[in-house]
Image: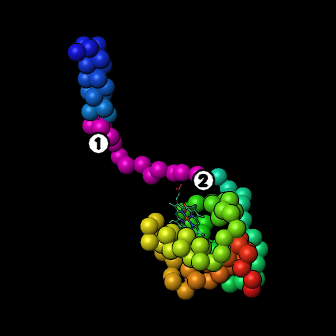
Amino acid sequence: MNVSKFASGTAARLALFTLTGALAVAPAHALEIKLPQETSQLKASTLAGHQAASAWCVMCHSVDYVNSQPPMPAAFWHAEVTKMVKVYGAPIPEDQVKLISEYLGIAYGNDSK
Ligand code: HEC
């Protein structure tokens, strides 16, 4: 066994233990995280789904995630938005999911109006 490795590992654990102890008694501070200004936007449209997407799809990530997808029809977007809801917990009501999928299929796919 490598003794110096063991010793430094023990020292690290001891330091971590001490730190954890110090944190336990330290008063809780609110953590402030400043996110950069969002610079990307969804493609403009008069469809109701545009407004819905602009409201719901910016909660967790940039709309660049949408902008960087290849052209896809509403069926793809419906599956995608459903994944946001079912897998990632996006609180988007089903009627909004439908509107958003229609809008994305037209604005980000080749679906016709
Ligand atoms: C509850 C949080 C949340 C909301 C709200 C949300 N997403 Fe996501 N989205 C995620 C997460 C988490 C990922 C995966 C991130 C990663 O893999 O880096 C993701 C990834 C994506 C991707 C990349 C492809 C993929 O499937 O990973 C697209 C496109 C996308 N989201 C579209 C949308 C659209 C459109 C909306 C609005 C209807 C939306 N998201 C709303 C959490 C969310």
How many marks can you see?
Answer: 2
Spot occupied by residue 26 in the image (x, y as percentages of width and height)? 33, 42
In the foreground, 11 or 112: 112
> Residue tagged by mark 2?
35
Task: Look at the image and say whether residue 89 sits in the magenta stretch.
Answer: no
Please indicate, yes or no, whether residue 11 appears anywhere in the rendered image: no
Q: Amino acid type of disc 2?
A: Leu
Badge 1: how crowded within 10 Å, few (<14), some, or many (20+)? few
Considering every residue shown, the one lying at the far top of the view is 3
Q: Earlier in the sequence, mark 2 or mark 1?
A: 1
Q: Is residue 58 above or below residue 6?
A: below
Q: Amino acid type of disc 1?
A: Val
| Extent of the magenta region | 20-34
Q: Look at 51% across and 83% down and name the residue there.
A: 94
How does the figure colour the protein chain or chains? rainbow
In the foreground, 72 or 58: 72
Whole-Å distance between the Cαs marked 2 and 1? 29 Å
Task: Look at the image and say whether residue 29 sits in the magenta stretch.
Answer: yes
Spot occupied by residue 79 in the image (x, y as percentages of width and height)? 53, 73
Spot occupied by residue 10 in the image (x, y as percentages of width and height)? 25, 23
Q: Main secondary structure of the magenta part?
A: loop
